[in-house]
């Protein structure tokens, strides 16, 4: 689900501008397919986009990738960027970081901002010469010149992890890419980074190590003190070896203080190590700690950086936190439209708090036209999922609706429930 979530978040919402959707929305699907099959590159890309997003056609990621590839082979920059993301995520095509790199480079050579975004993600992992977080940052800086808020947050999150010297190098490289003079003074993100460099990714956990961690966690919650100590010793061993999940597990255990002594300061150290390897759970937990001030000083900006990194990798809890931040203006400028965007994304992949928030947006006409039927459906979905606030809001919305509207709301709820279950798979 998370790979698909990231795919739709980036490719569908960024690769194709909204004004272009209106230009082909009325184009009959049969005519578009005929033009694509006849070799028209623009039609091939548009058909691929429809199949990927489900906009005007039944969603089919495999066929979408086929049309993206055909359009990319005709040097359509949008398609080059799109197929780069598809290869990166392994959606519609086998995951292939080298193929992704090849198409991302082509898109970037055509000046496509999403090509640079893909390159920034690719260079955070090892593609032969080791990770290169400074070049990844340079690519992210170029991508952010698109003015899109998601890419600006991605740039800011990576910048915040670099040393002053590395960030200065990244900014100089980004300027050279764009043919601009090198900046004299870096942005305010310069300074001591709050998290270790993202370039130092730990080894990929083997199946055997994953099993060792599972056994250790089972021992920790076991009945005997001896089992608990054995399990804790194994988790610490795996964490010291660089296994991100073990580092996150150790941090969580120290925060909870149920099976090991509570130590939030030590927990933060382990969570930072895991976050430096882009462990989504660690990033979200750290974000919450920076929001609340548990174990660290309250820092809304640092919380946003953690959430941004996790959300950029498809984490729906992080997206929900981003939505709340925009709704309340915590760490970012208050923006109902941005809040709705994040709630909508997370809601469609089963995050019940976001479903409730999305329902309230429709009930109040906040950032979207007021729609009680849509509000009812989302609030009912959230209530069924266990959100404790949704039942109260659902009752309030239902009290304003006619019997016919409630019936339509129930039908809409069933469709949403089925779609969310499909997307979560």
Image (cartoon, helix red, strand yellow):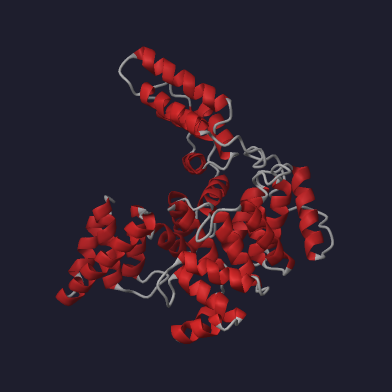
Q: Residue furthest left?
A: 403
Image location (x, y in percent) of residue 188: 70, 51
Q: Residue at x 72, y 70 (%)?
A: 110
- Pick the residue in front: 417 or 146: 417
- Pick the residue in front: 317 or 191: 317
Q: Residue at x 50, y 57 (%)?
A: 6
Position of residue 44 in the picture relative to residue 420 (left or right): right
Observer able to see residue 247: yes
How many numbered tags mark residues here?
A: 0
Position of residue 256 in the picture relative to residue 237 (left or right): left
Q: Residue at x 61, y 61 (%)?
A: 84
Image location (x, y in percent) of residue 323: 45, 57
- Pick the residue in front: 399 or 94: 94
Q: Residue furthest top?
A: 226
Image location (x, y in percent) of residue 82: 58, 66
Image location (x, y in percent) of residue 391: 23, 56
The image quarter in which residue 223 lies: top left
Determine whether 29 is above or below 170 in the image.
below
Q: Residue furthest front?
A: 38
Position of residue 186 in the picture relative to residue 324 (left or right): right
Observer able to see residue 325: no
Of the 4 image quadrants, the one containing the C terminus is bottom left
The image quarter in which residue 229 lies: top left
């Amino acid at each position: 689900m998370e790979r698909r979530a990231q795919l739709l978040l980036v490719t569908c919402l960024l690769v194709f501008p909204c004004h272009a959707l209106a230009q082909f929305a009325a184009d009959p699907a049969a005519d578009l397919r005929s033009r694509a099959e006849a070799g028209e590159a623009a039609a091939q890309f548009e058909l691929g986009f429809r199949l990927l997003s489900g906009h005007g056609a039944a969603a089919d990621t495999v066929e979408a990738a086929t049309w993206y590839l055909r359009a990319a082979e005709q040097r359509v920059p949008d398609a080059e960027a799109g197929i780069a993301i598809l290869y990166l995520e392994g959606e519609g095509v086998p995951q292939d970081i080298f193929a992704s790199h090849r198409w991302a480079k082509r898109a970037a050579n055509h000046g496509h901002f999403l090509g640079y975004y893909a390159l920034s993600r690719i260079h955070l992992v090892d593609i032969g010469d080791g990770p290169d977080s400074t070049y990844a940052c340079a690519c992210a800086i170029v991508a952010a010149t698109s003015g899109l808020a998601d890419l600006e947050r991605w740039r800011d999150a990576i910048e915040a992890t670099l040393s002053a010297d590395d960030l200065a190098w990244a900014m100089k490289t980004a300027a050279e890419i764009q043919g601009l003079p090198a900046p004299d003074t870096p942005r305010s993100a310069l300074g001591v980074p709050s998290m270790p460099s993202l370039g130092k990714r730990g080894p990929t956990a083997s199946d055997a190590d994953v099993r060792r961690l599972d056994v250790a966690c089972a021992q920790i919650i076991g009945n005997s003190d001896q089992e608990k100590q054995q399990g804790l010793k194994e988790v610490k061993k795996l964490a010291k070896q660089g296994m991100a999940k073990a580092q996150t597990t150790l941090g969580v255990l120290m925060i909870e203080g149920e099976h090991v002594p509570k130590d939030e300061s030590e927990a933060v150290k382990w969570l930072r190590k895991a976050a430096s390897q882009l462990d989504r759970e660690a990033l979200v937990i750290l974000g919450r700690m920076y929001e609340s001030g548990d174990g660290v000083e309250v820092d809304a900006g640092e919380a946003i950086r953690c959430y941004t990194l996790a959300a950029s990798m498809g984490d729906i809890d992080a997206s929900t936190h981003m939505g709340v931040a925009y709704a309340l203006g915590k760490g970012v400028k208050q923006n109902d439209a941005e809040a709705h965007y994040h709630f909508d994304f997370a809601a469609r992949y089963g995050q019940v708090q976001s479903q409730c928030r999305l329902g309230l947006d429709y009930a109040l006409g906040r950032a979207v036209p007021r729609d009680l039927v849509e509000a009812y459906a989302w609030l009912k979905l959230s209530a069924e999922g266990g959100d404790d606030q949704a039942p109260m809001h659902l009752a309030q919305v239902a009290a304003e609706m006619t019997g016919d509207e409630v019936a339509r709301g129930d039908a809409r709820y069933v469709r949403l429930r089925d779609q969310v279950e499909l997307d979560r798979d």
